[in-house]
Image (cartoon, rainbow, N blue to C red):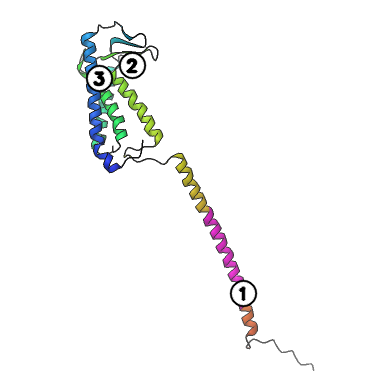
């Protein structure tokens, strides 16, 4: 990824974030609608053998069917994440399109599962999330499109952080640049020390020359004479 111009990229960052979040939410809810209307609960449907299996379950917990029985807590946390992202985006802090994609994926995924918790059975805020994707060769949990969006956003987060791309689209100096900067600072410090040493040497030499000139001037001055010897009695 190349460094972006903040003024140019920032204009489209927030709209891009919103489009990706809306697309992710729509894809997640459409997939869940198709699953709930066409699949039977707890009945596996092999799609590509054991590589990909659709297995419709209702999950009261977190992503990947973890921590069941804590639905209210996850509903509150998800709502807080959504509010924080919206407030952050409205303040214009996000000017990088890459970061807009990452946060859009996260927002779409969080909204997908939050929608289930708020509006699905058994009640508001306690709704069970629809999970249906099973890949037993990779992990034993069952998940959904929203979970994929969230995990993808975390992967992109790590990539952007590793590459040193900031939220405003600028790029933090890499390791090589930092080493060059440190070497430049060290070289400047060494140069300053050498200059100071040379200046001190020049000052000593000038002082010696001044003392020599003063001695020569005193010797040539007729007003300065040796003391006359005392006459013998």
Q: Which of marks 2 and 3 is in front?
A: 3
Task: Work out whether 4 lies above or below 190.
Answer: above
Q: Position of residue 213 (x, y in %)?
A: 61, 77
Give the number of the mark in front: 2 or 1: 2
The quarter of the picture where residue 91 lies is top left
Q: Which of marks 2 and 3 is nearer the N terminus?
A: 3
The disc at residue 64 is 2
* Circle 1: element type: helix
Which quarter of the rendering shows the N terminus? top left
Left or right: where does residue 137 sit relative to residue 198? left
Number of callouts: 3
Q: Considering the image in quadrants, where does the C terminus appear?
A: bottom right
Q: What stretch is highlighted in magenta?
A: 190-213
| Residue 114 visible in rendering | no
For this rendering, which residue is in front, 111 or 6? 6
Whether residue 192 is in magenta: the answer is yes
Q: How far apart are marks 3 and 1 (CA)?
A: 91 Å
Q: Which residue is drawn at 24% across and 35% down?
A: 14
Residue ID at (62%, 71%): 208
Is residue 72 among what the camera can see?
yes
Main secondary-structure element of the magenta-colored stretch: helix
Label for residue 201? none
- Mark 1 lies on residue: 211
Q: In this view, does 10 lie to the left or right of 185?
A: left
Foreground residue, 98 or 87? 98
Tell which tag, 3 or 1, sits nearer the viewer.
3
Residue at image mark 3 = 28
Q: Position of residue 214 (x, y in %)?
A: 61, 78
Q: Where is residue 141 in the image (x, y as percent from the top left)?
A: 35, 13
């Amino acid at each position: 990824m190349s460094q972006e111009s903040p003024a140019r990229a920032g204009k489209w960052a927030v709209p891009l974030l919103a489009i990706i979040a809306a697309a992710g939410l729509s894809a997640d809810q459409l997939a869940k609608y198709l699953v709930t209307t066409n699949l039977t609960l707890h009945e596996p449907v092999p799609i590509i053998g054991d590589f990909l299996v659709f297995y419709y379950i209702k999950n009261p917990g977190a992503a990947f069917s973890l921590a069941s029985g804590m639905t209210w807590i996850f509903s509150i946390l998800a709502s807080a994440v959504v509010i924080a992202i919206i407030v952050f985006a409205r303040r214009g802090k996000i000017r990088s399109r890459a970061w807009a994609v990452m946060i859009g994926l996260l927002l779409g995924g969080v909204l997908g599962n939050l929608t289930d918790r708020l509006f699905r059975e058994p009640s508001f805020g306690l709704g069970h999330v629809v999970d249906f994707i099973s890949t037993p060769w990779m992990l034993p949990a069952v998940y959904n499109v929203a979970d994929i969006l969230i995990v993808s956003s975390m992967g992109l987060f790590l990539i952007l952080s590793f590459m040193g791309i900031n939220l405003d689209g600028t790029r933090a100096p890499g390791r090589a640049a930092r080493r060059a900067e440190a070497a430049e600072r060290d070289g400047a410090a060494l140069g300053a020390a050498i200059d100071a040493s040379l200046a001190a040497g020049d000052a000593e030499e000038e002082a010696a020359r001044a003392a020599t000139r003063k001695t020569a001037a005193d010797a040539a001055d007729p007003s300065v004479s040796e003391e006359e010897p005392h006459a013998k009695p």
